[in-house]
Image (cartoon, rainbow, N blue to C red):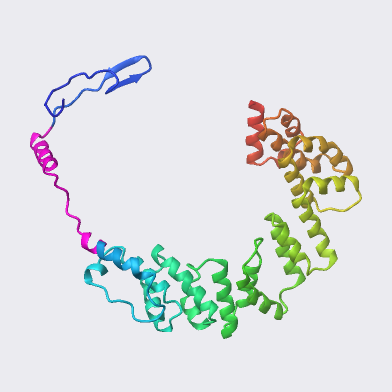
């Protein structure tokens, strides 16, 4: 209708109709503002005209070069490229594919370093940076590694640990102990690349039982029971015992809690017991609700100290929309209610 210049004309229902509530109305169709523009449009369409592709030749050349990049020899001169290919927007990806083949070639080092300097942290350069640093570390080329490493860019644990190892190897140890310690203090497992730096820290007498215990407790907080147990092996029993007990509460919370209920005189850290109780509640909220009175009695918890355990049970029950959750929310002390507890208390009340 528009193309024929028909004015405000209603169309059949189901095409341009709009329905709001019980009221139906039609969208008016407007007269074209420029018949000259439509004439140009129809002419271009009829002739099949399309914009010229300025990169057609470069794209064909790029595809051919990229297809052979993986077959280039690991050493030797990189093929020279035409100006057309160099001007193609994806040309840096061709360079990256070629450089990945030449990481072990000493003659390619200046080219790789210039490429990384030019492209910085651009996505196209990231894989080249990772591979280049890994290659330097494997060859123990520590001076070039220190020159290439960028702390703000190369943020993987392996890259950082190789940087620390490189500093040990070349004797740049000013402030190194603090940086190795900061890297060590994580609750997650670290790659084998970190071992030389930690061995150096141990040789300096700084990898103390207190520091190992700190890391083991970070691992427990992160739920990494296996790492915590591994670290506890090098600790005296007085330090290792509580760590292994907490690890058991992470790995088998119900079994560990049943054992603590059956042995009320056995000491346990409150934080560890609460962590295990939360895990038990999440796994089986109704069983935790049934165990709750026995736990409180066996561990001698007064109302204030029992509050966090009650709230953990309440939230687990509320996630399953079980009515008993309100009973346990009522046992919680106001100071123990965080935003999440308030939210699920409201949800439980509504349900």
Closer to the camera in the image, 190 or 66: 66
Q: Which residue is drawn at 35% across and 19% down?
A: 20
Q: Which residue is drawn at 63% across and 66% down?
A: 190
Closer to the camera in the image, 224 or 315: 224
Vertically, is 331 above or below 171?
above
x, y percentage for residue 65?
30, 68
x, y percentage for residue 145?
50, 78
Q: Which residues are drawn in magenta?
A: 33-59
Q: Residue at x 33, y 15 (%)?
A: 23
Instruction: Point out the image quarter for the N terminus.
Output: top left
Left or right for 348, reference 303:
left
x, y percentage for residue 241?
83, 61
x, y percentage for residue 139?
53, 81
Q: In which quarter of the image is residue 42?
A: top left
Vertically, is 127 above or below 331?
below
Closer to the camera in the image, 337 or 278: 278
Instruction: Point out the image quarter for the C terminus.
Output: top right
Q: Residue furthest bottom?
A: 171
In reply to whether residue 236 is colored magenta, the answer given is: no
Left or right for 345, reference 92:
right
Q: Residue furthest top?
A: 22
Left or right for 298, reference 244:
right
Q: In which quarter of the image is residue 186?
A: bottom right
């Amino acid at each position: 209708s528009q193309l024929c210049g028909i004015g405000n004309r209603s169309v059949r229902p189901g095409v341009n109709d709009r329905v709001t509530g019980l009221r139906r109305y039609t969208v008016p169709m407007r007269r074209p503002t420029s018949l000259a523009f439509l004439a140009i449009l129809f002419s271009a369409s009829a002739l099949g005209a399309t914009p010229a592709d300025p990169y057609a030749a470069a794209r064909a050349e790029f595809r051919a070069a990229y297809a052979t990049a993986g077959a280039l020899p690991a050493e030797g001169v990189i093929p020279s490229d035409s100006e057309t290919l160099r001007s193609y927007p994806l040309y840096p990806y061709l360079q990256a594919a070629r450089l990945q083949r030449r990481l072990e070639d000493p003659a390619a080092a200046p080219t790789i370093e210039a490429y990384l300097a030019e492209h910085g942290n651009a996505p196209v350069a990231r894989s080249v940076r990772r591979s280049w640093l890994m290659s330097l570390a494997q060859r123990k080329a520590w001076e070039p590694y220190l020159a290439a490493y960028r702390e703000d860019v190369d943020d993987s644990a392996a890259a950082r640990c190789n940087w620390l190892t490189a500093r040990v190897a070349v004797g740049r140890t000013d402030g190194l102990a603090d940086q190795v310690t900061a890297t060590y203090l994580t609750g997650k497992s670290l790659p084998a690349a970190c071992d030389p730096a930690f061995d150096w820290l141990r040789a300096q007498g700084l990898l103390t039982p207190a520091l190992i215990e700190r890391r083991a407790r970070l691992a427990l907080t992160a739920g990494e029971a296996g790492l915590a147990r591994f670290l506890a092996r090098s600790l005296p029993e007085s330090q290792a015992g509580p760590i292994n007990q907490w690890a058991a509460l992470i790995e088998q919370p119900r079994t560990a809690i049943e054992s603590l209920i059956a042995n009320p005189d056995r000491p346990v850290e409150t934080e560890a017991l609460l962590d295990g109780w939360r895990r038990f509640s999440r796994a089986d909220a109704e069983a935790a609700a049934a165990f709750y009175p026995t736990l409180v009695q066996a561990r001698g918890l007064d109302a204030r100290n029992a509050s966090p355990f009650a709230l953990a049970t309440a939230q687990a029950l509320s996630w399953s929309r079980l009515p008993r959750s309100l009973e346990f929310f009522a046992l919680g002390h106001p100071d123990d209610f965080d935003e999440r507890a308030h939210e699920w208390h409201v949800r439980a009340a509504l349900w």
